[in-house]
């Protein structure tokens, strides 16, 4: 538990399922007022219901993070609902699945880069504007904001797909740049790099290509995939005062993958 998170306000994009949903629920259990985000209204309402059933505070704001007007509305609804923005986990993305560069679809390249990388840029742009305005208004030298961007093990190594690797590497570069830019405002910006995690996406691949999933598992020295709760734990730590001197990092959560 992180008592210093109690009462803070967080946006978690792509939080209607998988890792994002777990992050949203864990934050709420720590007293964070959570803005759940995604494009599936039914799933968003269900995540909010789970949070409220456990005594937490949450609202669902549907928004496509690739559309600047949607992102601005997401920030505006956050302020209308809770009055401020302290934390943001930019998690929305897709796998952009495909293999060889020479045969990779240009349409898939565009859609994957737009969602995974441009989407995070747009979210950070408007989240940072709000956090800076709070810093100036409050002159709070202890805390102004914390952002965690969802990269991937594919942001540190190759082997996924052209667009997925490129987007996840790009997220780390964007994170490091922003961390340097906004350290003076006491806004910390970090990324996490999970390896394969038990999510609905992995479940889909388990049904359609079990041999591929078995090969993925063999790449993790720890012998299993990550649980969404294990990934969420890293996000909560990066949001908390326990990581107050950590910014500009890209933390692998990979069961030993990058140690090989």
Image (spheres, rainbow, N blue to C red):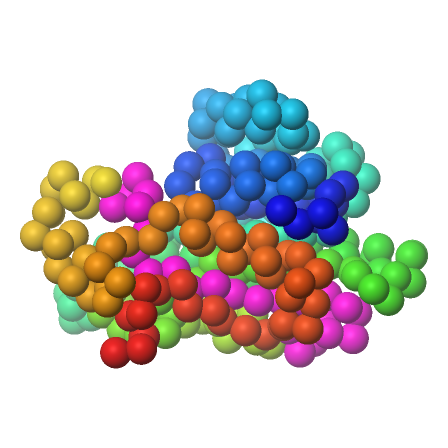
Residue sitting at x 66%, y 45%: 10
Q: Position of residue 63 (x, y in %)?
A: 55, 38
Read off the magenta span. Answer: 178-202
Residue 96 visible somewhere in the drawing: no
Residue 40 image position (x, y, % from top left): 45, 30
Q: Is residue 186 left or right of residue 19?
A: right
Q: Is residue 199 magenta?
A: yes
Give the percent coordinates (x, y) of residue 20. Answer: 48, 44
Q: Is residue 173 above or below residue 122?
A: below
Task: Residue at 50% x, 75% y: name it.
Answer: 173
Q: Quadrant of residue 29?
A: top right
Instruction: Give the image location of residue 248, x and y in percent.
Output: 59, 74
Question: Above or below — where is 200 with respect to 254?
Answer: above
Q: Is 175 inside the magenta-drawn segment? A: no
Name the foreground residue: 186 vs 1: 1
Give the position of the C terminus as an image quadrant. Answer: bottom left
Q: Is residue 159 visible?
A: yes
Outermost residue to the left: 211
Task: Give the residue drawn at x 81%, y 39%.
Answer: 83
- Residue 253 is left or right of residue 183, and the answer is left
């Amino acid at each position: 538990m992180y008592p210093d998170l109690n009462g803070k306000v967080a946006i978690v994009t792509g939080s209607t399922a998988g890792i994002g949903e777990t992050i949203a629920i864990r934050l709420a259990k720590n007293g964070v007022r959570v803005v759940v985000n995604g494009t599936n209204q039914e799933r968003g309402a269900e995540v909010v219901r789970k949070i409220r059933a456990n005594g937490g505070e949450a609202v669902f704001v549907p928004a496509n993070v690739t559309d600047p007007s949607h992102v601005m509305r997401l920030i505006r609804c956050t302020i209308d609902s809770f009055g401020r923005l302290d934390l943001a986990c930019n998690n929305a993305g897709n796998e952009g699945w495909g293999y060889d560069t020479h045969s990779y679809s240009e349409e898939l390249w565009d859609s994957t880069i737009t969602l995974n990388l441009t989407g995070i840029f747009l979210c950070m742009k408007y989240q940072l504007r709000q956090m800076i305005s709070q810093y100036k208004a409050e002159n709070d030298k202890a805390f102004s904001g914390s952002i965690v961007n969802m990269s991937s093990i594919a942001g540190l190594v190759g082997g996924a797909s052209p667009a997925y690797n490129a987007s996840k590497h790009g997220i780390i570069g964007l994170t490091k740049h922003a961390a340097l830019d906004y350290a003076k405002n006491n806004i910390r910006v970090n990324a996490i790099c999970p390896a394969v995690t038990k999510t609905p996406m992995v479940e889909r691949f388990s049904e359609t290509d079990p041999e591929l999933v078995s090969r993925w598992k063999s790449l993790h020295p720890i012998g299993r995939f990550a649980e969404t709760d294990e990934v969420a734990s890293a996000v909560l730590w990066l949001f908390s005062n326990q990581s107050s001197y950590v910014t500009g990092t890209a933390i692998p959560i990979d069961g030993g993958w990058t140690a090989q």
